[in-house]
Amino acid sequence: MTDPTPRRAPAGAAVLREDVTEAIRAAVFEELAAVGFARMSIEGIARRAGVGKTAVYRRWKSKLSLVLDLVGAFAAQGMPAPVTGSLDGDVRALLEVASGALRHPVASQVIPDLLVEAARHPEIAEAVTAALLDGQRGVVTRIVREAVARGELPEGTDPGRALDLIVGPLYWRLAVVRTGLPPGYVDDLARSAVAALRA
Amino acid sequence: MTDPTPRRAPAGAAVLREDVTEAIRAAVFEELAAVGFARMSIEGIARRAGVGKTAVYRRWKSKLSLVLDLVGAFAAQGMPAPVTGSLDGDVRALLEVASGALRHPVASQVIPDLLVEAARHPEIAEAVTAALLDGQRGVVTRIVREAVARGELPEGTDPGRALDLIVGPLYWRLAVVRTGLPPGYVDDLARSAVAALRA
């Protein structure tokens, strides 16, 4: 239960506290990759980070809130809003960003873990979904709104359905089928998604 | 380590062996729902089924082979080939069957578990994918072949890509977004999937 954050150095304390937070974040991703969410413990995270359990609990109240915080930050980081001026371009740019994010080890190992928790614990499903989807929902809502304004999609196009049609096939291929993306796949998918949106 | 299968009753033994097998199958689904794949043990399955561990190991060599066997049987059962005589009809029928199967508790809890194992253990990924996908791949290959023969899809349409476009959005909505299917969703999705296939 030792905590390396010194109690008597107010000037350096802020920096050291950030170092500890970063060490914990890095340790969580390593633990998740190594043993998965179900088997991961705050104790194991603290050991890997070289800090005391108290240092973890001072920052996050549970294993789940810790992981959701990190996943939310990762998802937001991987989701800059592509603005190209056309529906075709925006869909292609979104698929490019999403295919990079979904192939990242964090996504490919942590998302399945979180979906297991969501399927088994309805009370945490909403938090998991928000961490995974809020960034993408924002981007797709903007893409649909601008495409409607340009007359490329009909009024009343549902952004939720648009997200399903754009990201669904890519996620299925990368997370379930797991055979990778053949050359030209993202281009073909963008063309298909736009046709699907207009149907 | 007791096994209730009697050694001295050859006439009744076959029936009792089937009862034991069925008890084990039922126990596996209950254990999976209750504790998940990672925490599930052959010991727990045997206890719930009221049999000895030996009875389980005599039938399946590991926890994974047991679960894959059951999931494969479940997936094949939920996947009769819909034959309607048109691409629109076949895609709609497949989405209807798949949405029923994916909403079943077995699918919604066990598939995420298996994808976690696949992401973490490349050596079992192929077996997991085959158990989950072989049935659907067969159906989509048949649908595409017949649609090409009728002139509804171009020659050379890739059945793998067709599966992504048809089932991907539905899986994403049910397994990731988890907000359920609004009325008319499957019809809209069928129309969109056909447009996507033709794009």
Image (cartoon, coloured by chain):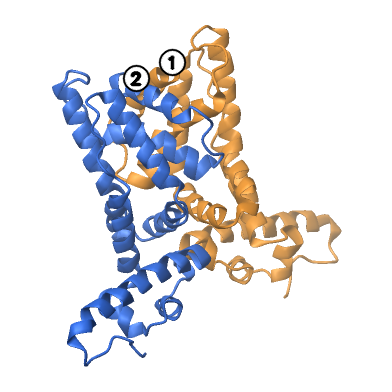
Chain colours: A orange, B blue
Packing grade of label 1 (10 A; few <14, some 14-19, many >=20) is: some
Residue at the front extreme of this rendering:
B11
For the residue pair A121 and A76, the one nearer the viewer reads as: A121
Q: Residue furthest left?
A: B149
Disc 2: CA contacts within 10 A as few (<14), some (14-19) or many (>=20): many
Q: Does the rendering let one see residue A184?
A: no
Q: Tell me, yes or no, whether the two marked residues, 1 and 2, touch with CB atoms within 8 Å.
A: yes
Which residue is nearer to you in this view: B15 or A22? B15
Question: How far is the residue under mark 1 from the one under mark 2?
Answer: 8 Å
Q: Chain of mark 1?
A: A
The residue lying at 36 percent from left, 40 percent from top is B97
The residue at which mark 2 appears reads as B195
Quadrant holding the C terminus of chain B: top left
Query: Three-letter amino acid code at disc 2?
Result: Ala
Question: What x and y, as percent, mark residue B24?
Answer: 36, 73
**Quarter of the rendering containing residue B56:** bottom left
Residue plotted at (36% across, 90% down): B2
Q: Is residue A89 visible?
A: yes
Q: Is residue B50 above or below residue A42?
A: below
Question: For the residue labelled by badge 2, is the local secondary structure a helix, a strand or a loop?
Answer: helix
Which image quarter is the N terminus of chain B in?
bottom left
Residue A183 spot, x, y in % from top left: 27, 31
Q: Is residue B83 shown above or below A48?
A: above
Task: Name the one closer to the observer, B10 or A52.
Answer: B10
In x, y percent, where is residue B184? 48, 27
List the residue tagged with mark 1. Answer: A198
The verdict on a common chain for dots 1 and 2 is no
- Name the residue: 33% across, 23% down: B194
Which amino acid type corresponds to the residue marked 1 in the rendered image?
Arg
Chain under numbered label 2: B
